[in-house]
Every structure is written in structure tokens, then in C-alpha cells.
Amino acid sequence: MASLQRRTNYPPRAVRYLVEGYNTVKWMKSTEPGRGLDLLCQLIDIDRAISRLGPKELQVILLHGQLGLTEQVVSELLGVRRATVSERYTRALEVLAADLNGSDEQP
């Protein structure tokens, strides 16, 4: 009986990632809620929602929310008050939540 083996071309870096990240990769393949496929769907949803944000909200979501810069650093980068960054971030999160939850009414 012939063995079926998928031929691949894994570069050394990919092999290292698979070995060192094995538990994470194994966890991600799960179809349980909150894991694997569910997380991929959530990423697609959030990517779509983020792409609909206005430029001011997008800036604070990327700089503060995704890159983890403090509100103070973001305020200095954007040349606005720290309170403005906080307000924009809160507003952006509300808009994202409304979009993700299918609300026609934006906050």
C-alpha cells in the first residue's frame, strides 16, 4: 500500500515556528467557540469593521489599541489633548461594537 504524503517546501524559519509554536498552532486549529476557526472569523469581522472607521478613530485604534502606545504618547504624536485621544478611542470602540453587532444605529 502506497503512503500518501503531502509534498511541502517548509523553509527553516517555518519549521522553527511550527516547533516552537506547536501548542499555539494546535490550539488554533480547534473549532470550539473562542478558538481556531471562531477566532479567524472574529479577525475577519474586526478587520472589516476597522476599515470602516473614520481617519481620527482609526488613528487611535491603531496607535493606542493595537500598538499599545499610551494615550499621552498618542496625544503627542497627533498633536491633540490626551482627553481627545481618550474620547476618540471610546467613540471608536462604540462604533466598532455597533458595527460588529449589526446595529444600524451608530452611537
Image: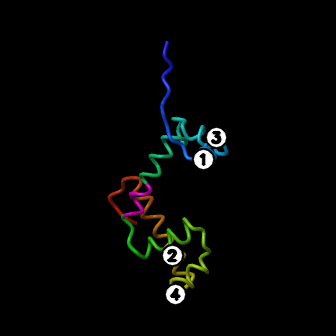
Query: Residues under labels 1 and 3: Cα distance?
Result: 15 Å
Eyeballing the image, is 48 above or below 8?
below
Q: Is residue 75 magenta?
A: no
Q: Which residue is mark 3?
A: 22
In the picture, measured across the screen, residue 63 lies left or right of residue 56, that is right
Which residue occupies 46% across, 64% down? 94
User: Which is nearer the N-term, disc 1 or disc 4?
Assistant: 1
Residue 52: name its quadrant: bottom left
Crowd around label 3: few <14 · some 14–19 · many ≥20 (10 Å): few
Horizontal and vertical percent position of residue 19: 65, 42
Q: What are the residue bounds of the magenta stretch?
A: 46-51
Residue at the far top: name it: 1
Q: Which residue is mark 1?
A: 12
Which residue occupies 42% across, 64% down? 95
Q: Which residue is mark 2?
A: 87
In the picture, measured across the screen, residue 52 lies left or right of residue 93, that is left
At label 4, the amino acid type is Gly
Q: Which residue is mark 4?
A: 79
Residue at the far left: name it: 104
Query: Residues under labels 1 and 2: Cα distance?
Result: 46 Å
Q: Secondary structure at mark 2?
A: helix
